[in-house]
Amino acid sequence: MNKSDSSSVDCFAMLDLPYEERCEFVREAKKCELNMNFVPYLDLLACHFKIRNQFDELVYIAMLLFLSLELLICLGYVVHYYYTPMLTALAKMLHMNEHLAGVTIISIGNTLPKLYDNLLGLELRTFRASQLSTGFLLLLFVAVSCVGLICYMRPFWMNSHRTVRDLLFFIYGLTLLEYVSINDGVITLIEYLLLIFVYLIYLTINVLDLYMQHLSLKFLRREMHARPTKVQALQEKYYILVQDLRLGTQCRSYSNSIRQEFQNSRNEACAGLKLCCLKDWQRANPLKRAFYIARAPIVLLCAIYIPLVDYERHRHGWCKLLNCMQICLNPTLTVALMFHDKSVPWYSSPCVLSFLLLTLPLSLFVLLHSNARVAPKYHSVFAILNLTGCLLITYHLVNELSLILELIGTLRHMPANVIGATVGPIASGLPDLVTSFSLCKQGYERMAYAAAIGSSILNIILGKSGNLITAMILYCLSPNDEVINVYSENAFILLLLGLLSMLLLISLFKCNAQRSLGVYSLSIYLTYLLFIVVVMKGTFHISTKGFLRTDHESDS
């Protein structure tokens, strides 16, 4: 292979070569190093494991599936025990209700890993159609799957005005994105600024809604004192507004069990390092014990790296010795993961050493100044370390899962366009799905629903438009119509029909999120997957140019 070819050749082209020549191809191709994140999967496949037949490939695929399951457990644990408690604590500090917290804090937090991924992709100038045109595919997965999971897990009463308003804003932003994408074949910066302006109007209306609700409460208090004959009717309105302003349901068995577990473990030096509760281990069946064993290294690594900030736990999650260690370890490892160079060991980087020298005196000061029995007043500052650690771990986990699933699909000879239309959006939307699941388990179902809609509206701007704006500003690139509409048209039609039908069903159910609505939402995405399978099998064809074709077919 020539040096000029080694930097531009596709790394997955090694699968077309004989087994004996794959190792040399991977070692010479420079793009294979850039496409991998931490684990060199192709180098393991071709050189270390020395795959020589299809049976060895199946064994390697089974190992990849086990690794992806472990990464998925890690993603769920980080989001459930560290990420969502910190976000809910931040919402309580800002005196937000569930809807505004979901629309702003949760949705923005879920979108930050995607934006970071897009910026890294643009920095490497790896512009692919699957990267620039999966906006509608991601919207379809996040909106339909998250809403379906929330309604199926925990039926609840919706706020009629906010639900209809959010869905109408979602439909308007979706149709506006479709219009500016296919109007003249080129998306300008002014059109993108128009999309951002629509999102800012949406946020402003939500903030004003909360402000007007507080004003209504003050007005009702005055009116209750002025009109004692109508106290009962006014108290009903007042109770409805107060319940809507509360963060979470009144009874949550999950938080009670967590609080009781940590109160019973006061004799431990640090309850955060417990890999598993002894009572849970004794009562668990063999399958659940296997889950605890698989989760044990994840629990230990997360306890050392991520500070715990949760106001529903004992001492708000404060552990003096562990938090002092995290003051040094968290920024250092975060910088090492963000700016790691594969040619230089992470511990020898000058940035890592400088951060370690800066944080060591601060750690000693906190160790001498703080009290082990009571959380200090500045314990909420640890939420910043919690946020950066959770977002960085989430980004790398999603990236690794996407690479593993893409490699498995390529080994099973799936077309590249099918992988881009299914694996990419699902991997990018996993944080939203896991966050919705975690919030529902903790009793914040209204916040989870608002976050699903808010994340979808924000993904219109950042999930697709954010990376293209960066491309236009940094590299002066103008995306054309062919790049944008390779995968998105059919997903747009399904998503628009699904939103309109969901709006109709919510009106018929009188804003009661029933389980049937969740099943219907999940069936929409299953219909999309069934459509891809039917097209891939050749049962019927579609007229969209370049959709679901292999690279060899497009070249011919």
Image (cartoon, rainbow, N blue to C red):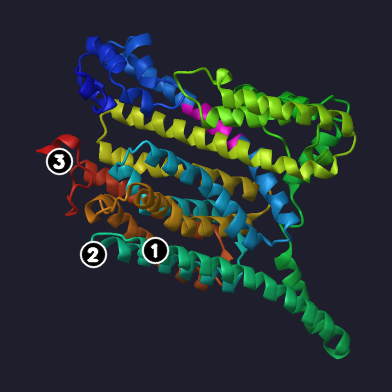
Which percent across, then down, holds residue 374?
A: 89, 38
- Name the residue tied to disc 3: 554
The front one of 514 and 350 is 350
Query: Which is nearer the eye, 75 or 445?
Result: 75
Depicted 385 relative to depicted 481: above or below: above
Q: Which mark is residue 508?
A: none
Residue 417: x percent and y percent?
A: 26, 41
Secondary structure beneath disc 1? helix
- Which residue reaches farthest left? 556
Tell me where residue 429 appears, x and y as whole percent: 47, 45
Q: Quadrant of the C terminus?
A: top left
The answer to whether residue 517 is seen in the rendering is yes
Foreground: disc 2 or disc 1? 2
Task: Inspect the magenta stretch and tell me whether residue 22 lies in it.
Answer: no
Locate the N terminus and report the quarter of the image it occupies: top left
- Name which quarter of the figure residue 290 lies in: top right
Mark 2 element type: loop
Q: Is residue 497 left or right of residue 272?
A: left
**Residue 327, quarter of the rendered image:** top right
| Disc marking residue 174 | 1
The local crowd at label 3, few if under 14, some if 14 to 19, many if 20 or more residues have their Cα within 10 Å, is few
Q: CA distance from mark 3 to mark 1?
A: 29 Å
* Residue 299 appears anywhere in the view: no
Q: Earlier in the sequence, mark 3 or mark 2?
A: 2
Q: Amino acid at mark 2?
A: Asp
Span highlighted in magenta in the image: 68-77
Q: Earlier in the sequence, mark 3 or mark 1?
A: 1
Give the x, y percent position of residue 321: 81, 26
524 above or below 213? above
